[in-house]
Amino acid sequence: MRDNQDTDRTEELVSTAMRELSEAIAAADDPALIGEFLACLLTPAELREVSTRWALVREIDAGTTQREIARKMGLSLCKITRGSKELKKDHSPFKKMIDLYRAKQ
């Protein structure tokens, strides 16, 4: 019983932290600060992974074929397909973020 309570508390803490993190990033209007923050928050490998995923969905959204992305970025077709599926979902958060990014350019 105690393990379930601990798990529930942990999940609640993680959920609260995710909401706070999202709000903090949304409140920042300084890309350099956000970049520095992410570099402090994430390990170099995690930062590379997150950045690669963003580049991947940007390439898919731009119409680059999955095979071309695999060749250019050295990624598996499985990972690229996952990104493609996420972009195709109704109300895709990836698509919304790409559109927000484009609007700022």
Image (cartoon, grey):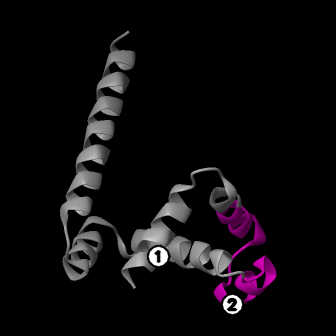
Give the residue at mark 1.
51
Lower position in the chain sequence, tag 1 or tag 2 = 1
Question: x, y (%) of residue 102?
Answer: 46, 79
Quarter location, residue 105: bottom left
Circle 1 crowding by C-alpha within 10 Å: few under 14, some 14–19, many from 20:
few
Q: Please state which amino acid type lies under the numbered disc 1.
A: Ser
In the rendered image, the vertical position of residue 58 relative to residue 20, given as above or below = below
Query: Looking at the image, how many numbered discs can be counted on the residues?
Result: 2
Give the structural element (helix, strand or loop) at label 2: helix
Q: Residue at x 42, y 68 (%)?
A: 46
Q: Which residues are magenta?
A: 64-84
Give the residue at mark 2.
72
> As drawn, is 87 to the left or to the right of 29?
right
Q: Residue furthest bottom?
A: 72
Does the magenta-highlighted stretch encompass residue 19?
A: no
Q: Residue at x 19, y 61 (%)?
A: 27
Does the magenta-highlighted stretch encompass residue 80?
A: yes
Residue 85 badge: none
Q: Residue furthest top?
A: 1
In the rendered image, the vertical position of residue 70 relative to residue 72, given as above or below = above
Give the structural element (helix, strand or loop) at label 1: helix
Q: Please state which amino acid type lies under the numbered disc 2.
A: Lys
Q: Residue at x 26, y 35 (%)?
A: 13
Front position in the image: 21 or 102: 102
